[in-house]
Amino acid sequence: MRYIWATLGLISLAIGLVGIVLPLVPTVPLMILAAFFFARSSEKLHNWLITHPTFGPSILDWQERGAIHPKGKRISTLSIVVVFLISVILGLRPMILIIQGVTLSAVLVFIWSRPNS
């Protein structure tokens, strides 16, 4: 089972790293997921990830307090607004826009209801 957890952690880590250069791929949530998997498979990889100077603070904020940094909240909000505006500009059907709007609004409520780190 440890190998499965480690493999899932490495996949999450790899996709999260892709998110650094692709704006719509969520980096930090995937790093948090990788830390979850590594905690169950490899103490060495888990410690490396939570002590990483870039990703570690966000992961620890989430693990300890369920907190999201205000800058992350603002970037997430901007990304969500841009994605919705692209959908509107592309002229998607109203029902799709309604579903997307409700879903993205729920995501925003969740993000902004989390404490600040």
Image (cartoon, rainbow, N blue to C red):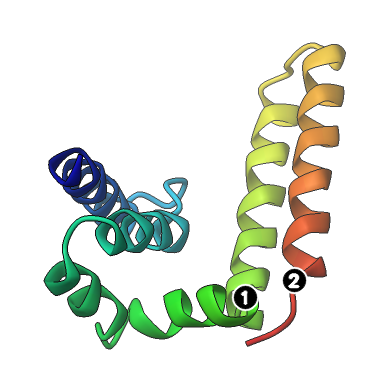
Quadrant of image for the N terminus? top left
Amino acid type at circle 2 is Arg
Residue nearest the viewer, comparing 44 with 71 = 44
Rendering coords of residue 67 (x, y %): 64, 77
Marks 2 and 1: in contact by CB < 8 Å? yes
Quadrant of image for the C terminus? bottom right
Q: Which residue is mark 2?
A: 114
- Residue 68, label in figure: 1
Quadrant for residue 87, please give it: top right
Q: Residue at x 32, y 56 (%)?
A: 34
Direction from residue 39 to residue 61 in the image, left or right: right
Residue nearest the viewer, comparing 110 with 23 = 110
Rendering coords of residue 88 (x, y %): 75, 29
Q: Residue at x 33, y 63 (%)?
A: 35
Q: Residue at x 42, y 85 (%)?
A: 57
Residue 28, above or below 87 = below
Rendering coords of residue 20 (x, y %): 31, 60
Kindly report the distance in space between the C-alpha atoms of the residues bearing marks 1 and 2. Answer: 6 Å
Residue nearest the viewer, comparing 33 with 82 = 33
Residue 55, above or below 8 = below
Q: Secondary structure at mark 2?
A: loop
Q: Residues within 10 Å of mark 1 (few under 14, many from 20)?
A: many
Amino acid type at circle 1 is Ile
- Which residue is the extreme one toward the front? 1
- Residue 94, label in figure: none
Direction from residue 30 to residue 103 in the image, left or right: right
Q: Secondary structure at mark 1?
A: loop
* Label located before the other in sequence (1 or 2): 1
